[in-house]
Image (tube, helix red, strand yellow):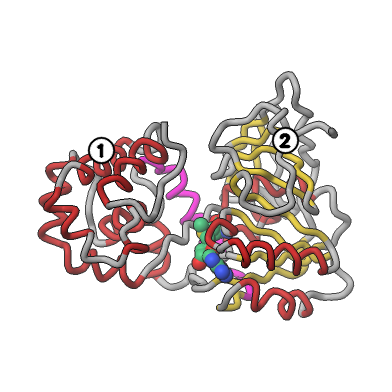
Amino acid sequence: MRTSVDNEAPTAERYRAFAEVEARGMSKTYDAWALGVAGDPATIALIDELPPAKRQPNLVFSAARFNGAEPAPYDAFKNWLREHWPPVRHTAETHATQTNEAGRCALHVPALAEIDGPLALLEVGASAGLCLYPDRYGYRYAGRERLDPADGASRVILDCETRETRGTAPVPVPTHLPDVVWRAGIDLNPLDVTNPDDLAWLDALIWPEHDDRRERLRAAASIVAADPPHLVAGDLNERLAALAAEAPGDATLVVFHTAVIAYLDEPARAGFVETVRTLPGHWLSVEGRSIVPGIRVRDDVPNDSTDFVLALDGVQRAWAQPHGRALTWVPNP
Ligand SMILES: C[S@@+](CC[C@H](N)C(=O)[O-])C[C@H]1O[C@@H](n2cnc3c(N)ncnc32)[C@H](O)[C@@H]1O
């Protein structure tokens, strides 16, 4: 069985791999659309009008959804795409996959609780910055009391399964949320939740069946819009040191990132790790296995093949479901 989608592969192969590796079990619609495209030379000819980097199924399907494509069987989608190809192509050419998932804060909160506050949060690859507000959301970790901001129940509730079986450690769910006094982010293209087009794009990036995530996006966006973060446009390696220097000296700096480092080539990944290790404070990384150089992966602890590696200061502390739905804490080696 294939385990990853090869971006250099012919379009039919990319779409078949996307169906089998990424969409299966996650989205019936995208599974069917991607398999349909893989066997449909006329639709492939349209998609191949895009540069190779823009032919990715997630981008093309999100661009279609942004322009109004509804979940439907492949034949209906194929006909819709043919009729609406010029605006879909334009959206794919001018946008990128920048999914911003507030649910990932459920992964960060137990690790942040280990750090003495108050905290200055700096997120690299922040998209619209929804993950910069862990202190403003509510949490339901399975089997634990609900956790809410000090000033009352949040309208965003993040459910997170705690996988505690043989070979794992108990998830150290805290009793209070972090005290965040500064929040800033870097992104190649920061999105603005107060801009209706940006919000519509973030919505379109959520897969069709994931209505809970769509609702969460709207609720989190309203929290962020009331107190927008300081987001800097640019490459994370070029901007990190200067932005970190802006953090208040009486707070503990935490540089963090989720689902970002895979976008960098090998030298940029190594350069980022080198820089982040020289900064004061702490470094929280939540990325696919073997994406971040120098982090030893704990395959001795039960995990799902799609789980991310959550590491604090370069040491793996947990396995994490990529959208924040579950955590498996790893015992000390
Ligand atoms: C998949 S999104 C994840 C967003 C957010 N971290 C989250 O977990 O919801 C990846 C983000 O990283 C950004 N990105 C990719 N490469 C980057 C780079 N070299 N410098 C800054 N941002 C980058 C993209 O623009 C995108 O917004």
Q: Quick check: is 310 in the magenta stretch? A: no
Separation of marks 1 and 2 at Cα, in angstroms: 34 Å
Mark linked to residue 298? 2
Q: Say above or below: 68 vs 236.
A: above
Please give left or right for residue 213 compared with residue 20 in the image.
right
Q: Residue 327 at what x, y percent from top left?
A: 66, 36
Three-letter residue code for mark 1? Ala
Q: Say above or below: 301 vs 325.
A: above
Q: Magenta segment range?
A: 209-230
Q: Look at 78% across and 29% down and name the residue there.
A: 170
Mark linked to residue 16? none
Element at badge 1? helix
Q: Residue 326 at what x, y percent from top left?
A: 61, 35
Q: Residue 25 at what x, y percent from top left?
A: 40, 32
- Residue closer to the observer: 254 or 173: 254
* SS assignment for the magenta stretch, majority: helix
Quarter of the figure with residue 53: bottom left
The quadrant in which the N terminus is found is top left
Q: Nearer the viewer, mark 1 or mark 2?
A: 2
Element at badge 2? loop
Three-letter residue code for mark 2? Arg
The quadrant in which the C terminus is found is top right
- Name which of mark 1 and mark 2 comes first in the sequence: 1
Q: Quick check: is 214 in the magenta stretch? A: yes
In the picture of the structure, the residue carrying the numbered disc 1 is 32
Which of the four quarters of the rendered structure image does ligand 1 lie in? bottom right
